[in-house]
Image: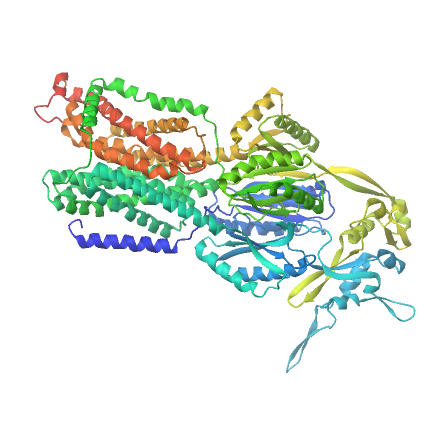
Amino acid sequence: MLNNPRYIALGVALVLVAGLAAVASLPRLEDPRFGNRHGIVLSSLPGASAERVETLIVEPIETELRSIPEINHLDSTAKSGVAAISIEFADEVKPDDTDRLWSEVRDKLEKAAKNLPADAAPPQLDHERNYAFTWIGSLRWQGEGQADLLRMGRYAEELASHLRNLHGTDIVKLWGAPAEEVQVKVDVIKAGAVGLDVPAIAALLGNSDAKTAAGELVSDKQRLSMELLGGFDQIERIRRTPLLTLADGGSLQLQDIARVYRGEPVVPSELAIIDGERSIAIAVRMLPTVRGDLWAEDLRHELREFTKNLPDEIVVEELFSQERYTSARLSELVSNIALGFLFIFSILLFTLGWRSAVIVALSLPLTMLYALACMNISGLPIHQMSVTGLIVALGIMVDNAIVVADMVRRYRESGYSAVAASVKAFKHLWVPLLGSTLTTMLTFMPIAMMPGSAGEFIGPLANSVIFALFGSWIISLFIIAPIAGRWLSAEQAPGMSSSAINRWFRAFLSRALMWPRRVALLCCVLPLIGFMVLKTLPEQFFPPSDRDMIDIEVYLPAGTGIRETQRATERMSEWINSHSEIEALHWFVGRSAPSFYYNLLDNRDGTPNYAQAMTTVSDPTNANRLVSVLQDELDQAFPEYQTIVRRLGQGPPTIAPVELRIYGSDIAQLKRLGDEVRRIALDLDDVVHVRDSLGEVVPKLWLDVEESEAQRSQVGLRDVSQLLAASVDGVISSSLLDGSEQLPVRVSGAGVKETSVDRFLSFPLILPTGSRPLSAISSAELRPAQAQITRRDGRRMNKVEIYVRDGVLPAVVLAAVRQSLDEHDFIVPVGYELEIGGEAEGRNRAVGKLMSSVGIILVLLIVTVVMAFNSFRLSALVFAVAFQSAGLGIFSLWLAGYPFGFTAIIGLMGLMGLAVNAAIVILTELKASPLAMAGNRAEIVETVSECTRHISSTTITTVAGLVPLLIAEGTFWPPFAVVLAGGTVLTTILSLVFVPTSFLVLRRPYLMKYFPGLAEDELKAEPKEQLSAPL
């Protein structure tokens, strides 16, 4: 094949076509998508306390779900009338298996529903919250007067239907849309005068709504289905529903004692406040298998067509588009690739000469296209991590081509023909290069094989590096080698070199080989210093991102109504908008905002005292600066609220940077322990807010009905409870069919839900013995009740969330909290347990998963290196260099002043495979020289000196390829690049001394065994015969 240029041309064409096809078809995302391992189960029991919800709703559901072994954690929250159970599958669950497991969860929920109270809502599973939305827009009212939310809601539903039918759309959801229904507000005084109450009226309406089939007539000739006229299809039909027949022969209609209208509930469950006005937000997520730029074009075309049919009063506006960030991120990464390519080519011109530089540079685009083709085959999209992997591989993938081109040049200088030089270089290098390539690939394998969210986030980087490395080996041997043989001549200039530096290095190495043991040990000092300073480096999981957006969350006291929370956001908006850098501020009240970043959690449902803001700033620099400014300003202006202002983070999601979980059975004891931890943590300077999940209470009205009075009125306590619930919350017993839309008809007491306690006690009860006020048979008392009860894996838990000041590492705050707890003699009683969560738990779990496959990979590495050298001692020398490289990488990180984060750990693993390439090249050349194998110092110096050209070239090009990451803004990639670049440079420099000196130390025992009479001075001079001994 090396002799046939047609095969080479066909190979190049194949790589070009496959790579360009991948560029055109690969999906383009901003960030990797996590596996669908998280879901939430929602249920309700109206009017029930948190304790009753825990007992009647949460525990039966948890009992069924715990039978699924793949579930890792169940986090439950029981509030007044509401239950929320978060489900997390184990990291080992593959993304392809999640659909099957969610189906199993639904089966368990159906089984659990049979054990729930009759008035409890069936549990609903939502597992579509794990991904950020691709596009978020809003429908806003720009007409005169108050916004017609019901009309806007109907248009929003229509738009959502259009977008669901758009090719490539995954899911569409609405925020702030009114829950339109038919409201029947009964005048309880008038109804009581005729002996009717809310439940009775609801039952009469249900009997009047004939929407059921009346049977089917079947004869020999035909079949006729029957249905009654009179079903509710107009508001007027409901108003004219007869309730009673009067004495004068007339009838009492519903409109005589009630007001009937279409509207939303008196108290909405959620609100979307867009630029200060109540609106409806619509969030759309595309499928991960489509190109984001093309899908965004189709979406905007659909929006343009839809807006043509909108009335002038309603407008559709874009609030967020991920495609803008994706395009900017990918453009920046492509620019980094081009910049790295320019650096590498410039260096190759000086180190190899222009002919060799052009040949080696040819391998870069070919290898890049090969890697993209592999990404296309494996289903790996183009996003931040996969493209960054190509940047990392940029300086590595050229190493094989440099070695091959340099070897071909040397053979051409020795007089070999073009074909013979290519073939000889191929035969000489294919095994060593395969060994070094596999070694580097295997060190990235634990990252690629890492399970869980952290692995899905960082794993694509390793995959693209592996694809590029293997492609570089194939292209260098089968394409670059024959091209180099034909294009490089015997007179080819080898590139620029410094004879002074070369002479100095030879002299230095010659002296080092006189005391090989001492020099080899001296080379270990700097790596050991690196390991020693490791304990002084602050720990970090993932750094914050650099984005022009801020996440703001506000918690009002438990029991606060949604309208008061809305007013609070209006007051806070004045402060926030006073900063000119703020470009957009959108509040979502009562629930979490639609996820506008890949690791934001959508886990707040039915929380009227909560609001989250999606804030856009002019640029990332101002966004980072405003975080601490807004945090201080809002805390001072609104001390009664808990306001949390944060930058968007990287990596898997966490609720709070520092978390402490206290487990136990008694709520009072858990509250006491949590309050003590909260008080201790708030005394720390770097803590801005602390929340404990059991720390709040809400006022609750307890009615003490005298049973004797109730019995005299011929009702029981349950009858009174059901009557009050129907009057306050309403009863749905019928529906209005309006075209294709079906609206529930809710019957409730007029003005009852929004009245005061004193007026409510005068509420007339329609009893069999007549109408009596509620106060006549009961007394009322306001008492504090537990706002919520939190559980984890079936145990009660008080979770203490600690939010830190911007710029302060969570690990530092966690250490300070633990120290402060010890100083205050905080002790968890027997039967209770304290557990660390937050970022520390995520980091430890991610590192554990990363190391889970290291054992297998290490065995494969040993096998690869031993097979390449056929020597255990030389292989041990290679692994010694890898161990040194880890210490040198840590030392580089310490010099640069970066924390020891997860990206630094990833960099260290890649470094250990990358930095040993110099050692492998040196040992390969030494092993190929009989004189060097004989321990001849002069030959060892000569052989190592011959390697310095391509070793220095590969090292410099590796660092040059990492320059775009080194100078990148933010703190995400620089630590990773510093570890790789700094560790590679220092390891290469030490390897040029450590490897030959250690090689000589390893050779001496065999030389003394096989040639015991060989004098020391004979080893220094040229031997009279070639000595060869087994290693």
Rendering colour mode: rainbow
Q: Nearer the viewer, residue 27 or 198?
A: 27
Whether 662 is drawn above or below 384: the answer is above
* Outermost residue, bottom side: 221
Instruction: Give the residue displayed 40% in from the left and 49% down from the top.
Output: 380
Q: Which of the 4 image quarters holds residue 341?
A: top left
Location of residue 963 (image quadrant): top left
Q: Is residue 201 above or below residue 554?
A: below
Q: Could you say where residue 190 lies in the image, as x and y percent from the top left?
A: 87, 59
Residue 86 in sight from this viewpoint: yes
Q: Is residue 866 above or below residue 41?
A: above
In the figure, is residue 315 to the left or right of 428? Answer: right
Quadrant location of the C terminus in the rendered image: top left
- 79 or 943, which lies in front? 943
In this rendering, position of residue 1014 left or right of residue 595: left
Left or right side of 874 for 657: right
